[in-house]
Amino acid sequence: MTAGEALERLRDGNRRFVSNQIADNASDARRRAELVAGQAPFAIVLGCSDSRVPAELVFDQGFGDLFVIRVAGNIVAPSQVGSVEFAAARFGTPLVVVMGHSQCGAVVAAFEEASGRATSQSRNLRSIVDRVRPAVDTVLASCGGHDADAVIREAVRANVRASVNHLRHGSELLEQLIQSNGLVVVGAEYSLETGVVDFFDGVPEA
Ligand SMILES: [Zn+2]
């Protein structure tokens, strides 16, 4: 499967999800048994841990279809890069999707911190917020931050772009797969309001 075909499959699944025409692929015991021998996921999804954004459901996919990494704020730290490298190299998965979402709590936390309204207490939580901060700071620098909702909307996308760039350029292995094997990394945003996933960054021409 090519990256373009994988992307179409995700788009089709999201259309089914949005229109409430979900395929019967979730809990098939036979499919589960087939997968005991091995997996060949067609897409890698790096998404947020938010309980409202489960990748398999919003793309209407079943067992064995997606290799999913979830972490608050869909940030890219070394273990996320390693997980993507593992799946891309081991299974030849052609597509990586970084998926942010509207009203992301990690982005809101980074925005509150940037505007002096809150600071995160725990060192562990801070390690997440620190990775989101540059995206928020960039948006604040360009638009001033008078409209908090607009800043957060923009920062969600800036944060996705930052993660996409990190995956594209922060790993020799991934860079090599992109150059020689047709691996594609795209950025997307899931809308809590509509259920629609908008692929807005790095989508290859059809
Ligand atoms: Zn989130």
Image (spheres, helix red, strand yellow):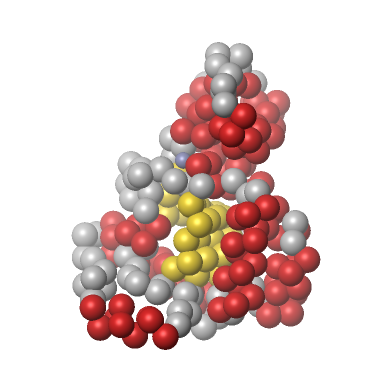
Residue 150 visible in the shown view: no
Which is nearer the eye, 185 or 89? Answer: 89
Image-quadrant location for residue 62:
bottom left
**Can you say whether 180 is above or below 157 in the image?**
below
**Residue name at image x 36 percent, y 62 percent:** 56
Q: In what quadrant of the picture does the C terminus appear?
A: bottom right
Which is nearer the eye, 5 or 106? Answer: 106
Is 142 on the left or on the right of 204, as rendered?
right
Which is nearer the eye, 179 or 92? Answer: 92
**Residue name at image x 65 percent, y 58 percent:** 81
**Residue name at image x 46 percent, y 33 percent:** 105
Q: How many marks?
A: 0
* Residue 14 image position (x, y, % from top left): 35, 62
Image-quadrant location for residue 11:
bottom left
* Residue 57 image position (x, y, % from top left): 32, 59
* Residue 23 image position (x, y, % from top left): 24, 71
Which is nearer the eye, 2 or 45? Answer: 45
**Can you say whether 56 is above or below 205 in the image?**
above
* Residue 157 image position (x, y, % from top left): 56, 43
**Residue name at image x 50 percent, y 42 percent:** 72
Is 30 on the left or on the right of 11, as rendered?
left
Is 185 on the left or on the right of 152, as rendered?
right
